[in-house]
């Protein structure tokens, strides 16, 4: 970073930089949009649409149970409760960070920066804890000999330390460079910058009494001092929402003509709605999850909820599961263990639909009654491990055909 800064300063002295301020802003993680707003992952969170989209994705991922499973010889699976990684994924990532907080922080960083990192602390070869790292403090570099990535972490005091890829848990999203994801915020900086400008414009409009400005008409010439007093007295008495509607008193034949809203002002709400859709498109969030319910009906709400799971959440969940397999399991363990998110909790809020699905699963022999009770955190009962089959699923051939006599 220092070398790049020196290079930029030398170029600026020679006058070869087209836009020195833009280059310096980009170096320090800030990129101005065409709207004039410097968009960064931090400033973007001041945009309600961005905050809501990141919140929906991060909290949805964090609330889903994440467990380590062990493959059984017969083809089934069971939870690997005795493996130390199971506690880190479902209980505590470290002594001061719960598994929920760990997933929430890393998923938020992944949505904002395109990359999320955690230090893997191993004791005697066993993973003891996972410690989140701030994404801006980590740089991914590639070994020119092996083409493997390694990580350079910059501490708050400016010191740096290099970590092997086996020491860093790395989540990354879509990217054009190897081993590095692109920040969705920086890829959509123009849409986010426009949304921020419109938010500020609306706030200033209502801060001025939600009325357009106007002009004074006067037949005589006013001096600079008189103009200043007129402007100051008018703003003091009539500017701001608290002064809206007050009576305006003019002297000596002076007239005030308010400027009317133009077509752009009248389309302001429609433009803000369009920016909401633009940001939702970046994160692939259904609009109704951002509280835009204009086109939401009882018929399509369920389908959009399913779309959120299959098209929005599942790619993020597969990213997590792949990173866990790559960084947290050894080569020998990968054949026996795997991590998986349980998405059943997304349907738990709909009691009728959930129990209807349970009834169909038990009736058709897909689940036993005790498996259903375990999913609902209820104790088993005697005889509940038996699977039930509908009577019409019995072999329809004649009895003699069943024993092979025909």
Image (spheres, rainbow, N blue to C red):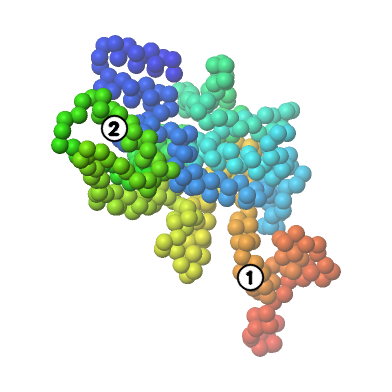
**Residue 368 in the image: above or below residue 243:** below
Q: Secondary structure at mark 2?
A: helix
In this view of the protein, can residue 146 be seen by the observer? no
Residue 303 placed where, x, y %? Answer: 48, 64
User: Would residue 196 appear left or right of 385 to someone viewing this image?
Assistant: left
Residue 231 found in image quarter:
top left
Q: Is residue 88 left or right of residue 28?
A: right
Q: Residue at x 51, y 61 (%)?
A: 306
The image quadrant where one finds the C terminus is bottom right
Residue 17 visible to an observer of this rendering: yes
- Residue 212: image x %, image y %? 30, 44
Mark 1 residue crowding within 10 angstroms, few (<14) / some (14–19) / many (20+):
few
Work out how far the residue at label 1 is from the one at label 2, CA to CA, in angstroms: 68 Å
Residue 212 placement, left or right of 192: left
- In the rendered image, the quadrant that contains the N terminus is top left
Q: Which residue is mark 2?
A: 230
Whether 150 is drawn above or below 259: the answer is above
Q: Number of labelled discs?
A: 2
Picture disc at residue 260: none
Residue behind mark 1: 352
Name the spot of residue 307 as percent of width and height, x first: 48, 59
Q: Earlier in the sequence, mark 1 or mark 2?
A: 2
Which residue is drawn at the image coordinates 48% and 55% (left, top)? 291
* Mark in front: 1 vs 2: 2
Tag 1, which secondary structure? helix
Residue located at (75% from left, 59% from top): 377
Q: Are marks 1 and 2 in contact (CB under 8 Å)?
A: no
> In terms of depth relative to the viewer, which is nearer, 39 or 79?
39
For the point 47% across and 53% down, the residue is 290
In the displayed orientation, state which residue is furthest to the front: 252
Q: Residues within 10 Å of mark 2 (few under 14, many from 20)?
A: some
Task: Looking at the picture, tell me which residue is in the foreground, 393 or 352.
Answer: 352
């Amino acid at each position: 970073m220092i070398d790049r800064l020196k290079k930029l300063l030398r170029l600026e002295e020679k006058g070869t930089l087209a836009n020195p301020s833009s280059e310096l802003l980009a170096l320090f993680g800030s990129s101005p949009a065409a709207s004039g707003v410097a968009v960064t992952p931090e400033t973007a969170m001041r945009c309600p649409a961005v905050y809501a989209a990141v919140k929906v994705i991060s909290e949805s991922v964090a609330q889903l149970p994440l467990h380590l499973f062990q493959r059984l010889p017969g083809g089934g699976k069971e939870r690997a409760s005795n493996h130390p990684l199971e506690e880190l994924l479902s209980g505590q990532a470290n002594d001061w960070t719960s598994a929920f907080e760990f997933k929430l922080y890393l998923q938020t960083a992944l949505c904002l920066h395109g990359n999320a990192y955690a230090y893997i602390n191993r004791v005697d070869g066993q993973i003891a804890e996972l410690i989140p790292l701030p994404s801006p403090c980590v740089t991914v570099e590639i070994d020119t000999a092996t083409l493997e990535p390694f990580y350079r972490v910059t501490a708050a005091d400016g010191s740096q330390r290099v970590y092997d890829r086996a020491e860093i848990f790395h989540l990354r999203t879509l990217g054009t460079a190897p081993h590095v994801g692109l920040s969705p915020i920086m890829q959509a900086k123009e849409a986010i910058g426009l949304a921020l400008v419109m938010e500020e414009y609306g706030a200033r409009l209502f801060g001025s009494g939600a009325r357009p400005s106007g002009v004074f008409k006067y037949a005589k010439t006013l001096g600079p001092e008189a103009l200043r007093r007129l402007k100051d007295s008018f703003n003091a008495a009539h500017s701001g929402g608290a002064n809206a509607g007050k009576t305006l008193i003019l002297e000596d034949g002076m007239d005030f003509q308010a400027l009317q809203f133009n077509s752009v002002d009248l389309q302001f709400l429609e433009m803000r709605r369009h920016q909401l859709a633009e940001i939702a498109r970046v994160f692939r969030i259904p609009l109704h999850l951002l509280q835009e319910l204009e086109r939401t009906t009882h018929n399509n709400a369920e389908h959009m909820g399913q779309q959120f799971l299959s098209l929005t959440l599942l790619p993020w969940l597969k990213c997590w599961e792949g990173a866990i397999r790559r960084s947290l399991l050894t080569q020998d363990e990968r054949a026996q263990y795997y991590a998986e998110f349980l998405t059943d909790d997304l349907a738990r809020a709909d009691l009728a639909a959930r129990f209807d699905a349970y009834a169909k699963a038990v009736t058709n022999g897909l689940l036993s009654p005790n498996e259903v009770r375990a999913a609902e955190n209820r104790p088993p009962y005697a005889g509940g491990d038996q699977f039930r089959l509908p009577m019409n699923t019995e072999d329809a051939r004649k009895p003699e055909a069943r024993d092979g006599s025909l």
